[in-house]
Image (cartoon, helix red, strand yellow):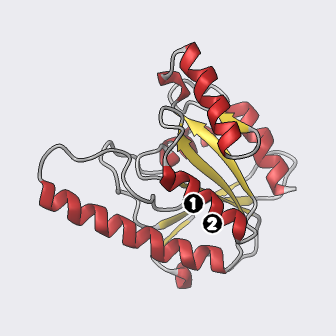
Amino acid sequence: MTSAAAASGFPRETRPEIAMVGRSNVGKSSLINALLKQPLARTSAAPGKTRLANFFRVQLSGRAPFFLVDLPGYGYARAARSGAGKAAERREDARAAFDQLAAEYFAAGRGAVLLLVDSRHPDLDADLRAWAWMVDHGVTVHVVATKVDKLTQAERQRHLGALERRYSGPVSAVSAHTGEGLEALWTQIARLLG
């Protein structure tokens, strides 16, 4: 529906919202595209491409419309292999974009959050810090483990168990690539919307 670089650009209409939050390249935009079954959110293999808050108006049968919000990522999922100076600059720009927009978004108390974490890396401190900050500030947050198709069965069991212990509750396991877990995630989104 719209993209915003600051709170002044956020939609004025009052609708329930679910924000996608997570590290750069964790799969926020890919998951939005998989959930909506169309390529609406811009994706890239290079981290830090999302610099705006992107609002997607979603209408599910039998429900009032709501916004699915793609926020910029925090940090980097992986280090750049070349162009260290430019990579560091992009990293700093992406971090600044997330810090500014997230502060404005959460200050406005706009809605619930799906915190996306890479299932292959269940122990990253940046993810735990983001989760703890949201919980401490009264934000309703549900953890979603992305890229589960890249795990073996043994890794999946071990990593998902670690994530549930780390985040003190159930974690939705999804793959934007295969579609695994999307139906269950829609059920969770409906719960968050109330």
List the single residue furthest toward the top: 153
104, above or below 164, in the image: below
Q: Quadrant of residue 187?
A: top right
Q: Which residue is mark 2?
A: 133
Nearest to the observer: residue 14 or residue 89:
89
User: Residue shown at 60%/74% (left/top)?
Assistant: 105
163, above or below 22, in the image: above
Q: Which residue is mark 1?
A: 130
Q: Quadrant of residue 93?
A: bottom left
User: Residue shown at 17%/43% (left/top)?
Assistant: 81
Nearest to the observer: residue 50 or residue 148:
148
Check whether the beta carbons of the residues at disc 2 and disc 1 lie within 8 A of each other. yes
Which labelled disc corresponds to residue 183? none
Task: Tell me the quarter of the image containing the C terminus.
Answer: bottom right
Considering the numbered disc 1 on the image, is that residue within a helix, a strand or a loop?
helix
- The amino acid at mark 1 is Ala
Task: Tell me the quarter of the image containing the N terminus.
Answer: bottom right
- The amino acid at mark 2 is Trp
168, above or below 70, in the image: above
Work out whether residue 159 can be spotted: yes
Residue 190: x percent and y percent?
81, 48
